[in-house]
Amino acid sequence: MALTLNLGVLDVAYSGDKKATTTGAVAQILEDRYHVFEIFWESRKGKIAEWIAEGIATEIEDVLSGKRPNRDPFMDAMQQIETEFRAFLDADEISKIMPITMQITAAQMGHSKRFKDRYNTEGKRDARPALIDSGLFQASMRAFISGKLSEG
C-alpha cells in the first residue's frame, strides 16, 4: 500500500549537441551537484501534499455521487507540481536558497546555448535564471505517482 511521488524529466536529447547530452543526464548532474529536485520538494511539500489530497478527495466524492472512477486522481496534482517546478526555476528560487556560484555567474553574465553568441560577448542579453539555459530541462520536468493503493 505504498505510493511514491517521482520527480524527474522526460529523457530528451539536446538538438545540435555533438556529445548527445540528454535531459536525463543533465537532471542527474543538477541533482547530484545542486539537489534541485530535493530543494524543490522541501520548499513545496506542504502544497504538494494538499494537491494530492484534493485529487483523492475529489475522486472519492465523484465515486460516492455515482460517477465512474475513470480518471487518474493524481493527474491534476501532477500538473500543478510540474507548473510549480517551472515557476520555481523561473523565479530563480534555488539561487536564493543555495549558492550556486558557477551557474549564477554564467546566468548573471547572460550565457546561453540558445544564441549564436552563447557567451554574450557583445553584452546584448541580461542575466537569466540559474539552471535555465536552453529551457529543455525545465520543459521536460515530469511528476508521477508509482506504486499501488491496494494490497496484494
Image (cartoon, rainbow, N blue to C red):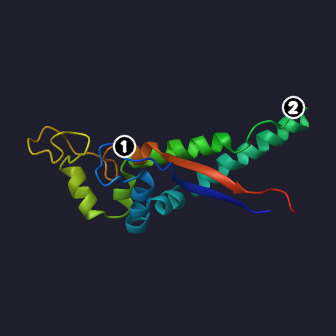
**Nearer-the-camera pick, 1 or 108:** 1
- Determine if residue 87 is in view: no
Q: Measuring from the top left, give residue 73's x and y in whole percent.
A: 74, 43
| Element type at mark 2 | loop
Give the quadrant of the C terminus: bottom right
Judge from the rendering whether residue 56 lies leftward or rightward of residue 84; answer left or right.
right
Q: Which residue is mark 2?
A: 67
Picture residue at 89% right of the left edge, 33% below the top: 65
Q: Measuring from the top left, give residue 149's x and y in whole percent.
A: 80, 56
Judge from the rendering whether residue 128 lies leftward or rightward of residue 122; answer left or right.
right
Q: Measuring from the top left, give residue 15's x and y in whole percent.
A: 34, 43
Q: Residue 125, relative to residue 25: is it above or below? A: above
Picture residue at 51% right of the left edge, 41% below the top: 83
Picture residue at 36% right of the left edge, 54% below the top: 21
Q: Measuring from the top left, give residue 2's x and y in whole percent.
A: 75, 63
Picture residue at 19% right of the left edge, 41% below the top: 126
The circle drawn on residue 16 is none
Q: Which residue is mark 1?
A: 135
Q: Residues within 10 Å of mark 1 (few under 14, many from 20)?
A: some
Q: Residue 79, relative to residue 1: is it above or below? A: above
Residue furthest bottom in the image: 32
Amino acid type at mark 2? Lys
Q: Residues within 10 Å of mark 2 (few under 14, many from 20)?
A: few
